[in-house]
Image: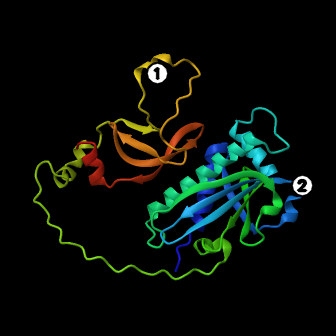
Amino acid sequence: MASDLSNILKEELSNTLEQLLGKKAKVSNINPFEISNFEGQQVIFCETKFDFKNISSFIKFFIPTKSATNFEFLMLGGMGDLKDNLDDETLDALNEIVSNVCGSFCTVTNAQGFSDIGSIKFEIKNKDISELNIVPKSNSFDFIMDLEGSNYSIIISFEDEISPYFSQITGASSKAIVEEEPKIKAPVHTLAPTHNSIPYVSKNLELLQNVKLKLSVRLGTKVVLLKDILRWDVGEIIELEQMVNEPLEVLVNGVKIGEGEAVIVEGKFGLKIKRIGNEELKLAQIGL
């Protein structure tokens, strides 16, 4: 049967909005889309292609005017006036939200190791300001997002091919998965432990528990010329190589041991671990 990714999508939708908008968010309800509930509103449309192990299909996001303008307003820290209509700035803000939702969704899904899904990746193929009549009548659902007592809608539409992977939401029948033949593993030859081996270190790990190590998070990197650095002044914008939907690198003493995403904890930046090495890997990487 197909793996169900419904809960991962709901969780990452809530987490991403909470991080970007600065308000506690949760999916309070999911209803079939009814166009009559959104009369007089336009939508921000983001068409996103997902590549699974065996299929490529689309999930389409439609954010009505009320939700889109409020989300943009909150992303800007509540400064300025709340807009009545959609514009290109709102489109860019909502494209960033959708991109972050999809990136986080892919990262968490890949960490689960679902055999029928493989390594999932996404690409936003199209974005626009449009009318409500472009929302498909079937397989479209109104996600009611509760932001500290205020409700906002995000309409998500699933193509037929991808619907079984969100059966809790779509009600689509899960399709059978063709199991791979088990691979024959070559015998593993274990070397006798030495004083520099991990098993030896593990036995004496208690001696190292209070050693202080520097933890840092790398947002991105870029190779630049000295002459460019000398020209920099206040207000200069430096474009990093890291994409906005890629996880942040977790470093200990300058060595990468895992990946995560930024979160806000009581007004301070924090880090939510998404992937991290096992104990032996972590010890080896930091030189213990």
Question: Horizontal placement of 192 versus 45: left or right?
Answer: left
Residue with the mark numbered 1: 228
Residue with the mark numbered 2: 40
Picture quarter containing residue 126?
Answer: bottom right
Question: Horizontal placement of 192 versus 268: left or right?
Answer: left
Q: Give the answer, above or below, for where 33 lies relative to 180.
A: above
Q: Give the answer, above or below, for where 187 lies relative to 22.
A: below
Q: Earlier along the polypeptide chain: callout 2 or callout 1?
A: 2
- Rate crowding at label 2 as few (under 14), some (14 to 19) or many (20 or more) other CA atoms within 10 Å: few
Residue 189 is marked as: none
Q: Amino acid at mark 2?
A: Gly
In percent of the image, x 59 and y 40: which residue is there?
Answer: 266
Where's residue 208, x and y in %? Answer: 25, 42
Question: Horizontal placement of 140 versus 282: left or right?
Answer: right
Q: Amino acid at mark 1?
A: Asp
In terms of depth relative to the viewer, which is nearer, 13 or 63? Answer: 63
Where's residue 78, x and y in %? Answer: 74, 36
